Image: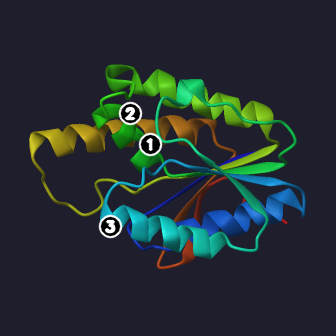
Amino acid sequence: MLVLVTGGAASGKSALAEDIVCRLAHGKPMLYVAAMEPYGEEAQRRIMRHRALRAGKGFDTCEHAKRFDRLCVPMGYEAALFECMGTALANELFSPDGAKENWKDSILSGVDTLTRACSHVVFVTNEVFSDGRAYDAGTMAYLHALGQLNQLLAQRADAVLESVCGIPVTMKGSANFG
C-alpha cells in the first residue's frame, strides 16, 4: 500500500504519517527515510524534533538526502516512512551533487525502490499553492515541480490524506489503516 500525506507547515502531517506507518506495520520492522540534510541551526532543530517524535516507536533510520535513484533499502521492513518530498526535491534541484533536471527520474526511482522493498510506504509532502501568494520565478518553478511530483505520487497512491490542523482529511482511498 502506498499512502501520500500532505499538509501545510506545522499541520500535523508528520505525526499523522508516523501513526499510519505504525498501524500498517502491525509491530513489524519499520524504516524512516530522512531526506533532510543537517545544514544550519533550523535544520538541526527540525531533525531533533522529528527524532523525538518517533523515539521509542521502533523505526530504523536511513538518512538519504538526494540522488534517490541510488537509494538502497535493506529487505525485511514491513513499512517505510519517507520524510519529506519537498525537501527531497529541493536537494535534487539545488544541491551541487543533486540530480538537477533529472529530479523526477531520480525521485521516482527511489519511490519504486521503497515500494518494492516494503509492503507499505507512506510519503510526506507539502501542500502547495493553497496560500494564494505569488513568489519569485525560482520559487514558483520549485513549487510547480513539487506540485507535479505530488500529482504523480497521488496517482500512484492507494490513499491520499491531507492533515488540516492535525485532522486527517481523506482525499483518495480509505483511511482505514488498522
**Where is the C terminus found, in terms of image quarters?**
bottom right
**x, y percent for residue 129:** 28, 54
Which amino acid type is marked by label 2?
Glu
Task: Assign a secondary structure to mark 3.
Answer: helix
Q: How is the image coloured?
A: rainbow
Marked residue nearer the N-terminal end (3 or 2): 3
Which amino acid type is marked by label 1?
Ala
**x, y percent for residue 17:** 63, 63
- For the residues labelled 1 and 2, the Cα–Cα distance comes to 6 Å
**x, y percent for residue 161:** 58, 60
Q: Which quadrant would residue 75 be assigned to in this image?
A: top right
Mark 1 in CB contact with mark 2 (< 8 angstroms): yes
Question: Which residue sits at x=28%, y=36%?
Answer: 94
Task: Assign a secondary structure to mark 2.
Answer: helix
- Looking at the image, residue 143 sits to the left or right of residue 165; the answer is left
Question: Which residue sits at x=48%, y=53%?
Answer: 125
- Looking at the image, residue 46 sits to the left or right of residue 64; the answer is left
- For the residues labelled 3 and 2, the Cα–Cα distance comes to 21 Å
State whether residue 3 is above or below residue 144: below
Which amino acid type is marked by label 3?
Glu
Q: Which residue is mark 3?
A: 41
Question: Which residue sits at x=33%, y=25%?
Answer: 100
Question: Which residue sits at x=32%, y=35%?
Answer: 95
- For the residues labelled 3 and 1, the Cα–Cα distance comes to 19 Å
**Where is the N terminus found, in terms of image quarters?**
top right
What label does residue 88 carry, if any? 1
Mark 2 surroundings: few (<14), some (14-19) or many (≥20) residues within 10 A: many
What label does residue 92 carry, if any? 2
Mark 1 surroundings: few (<14), some (14-19) or many (≥20) residues within 10 A: many
Q: Which quadrant would residue 114 be assigned to in this image?
A: top right
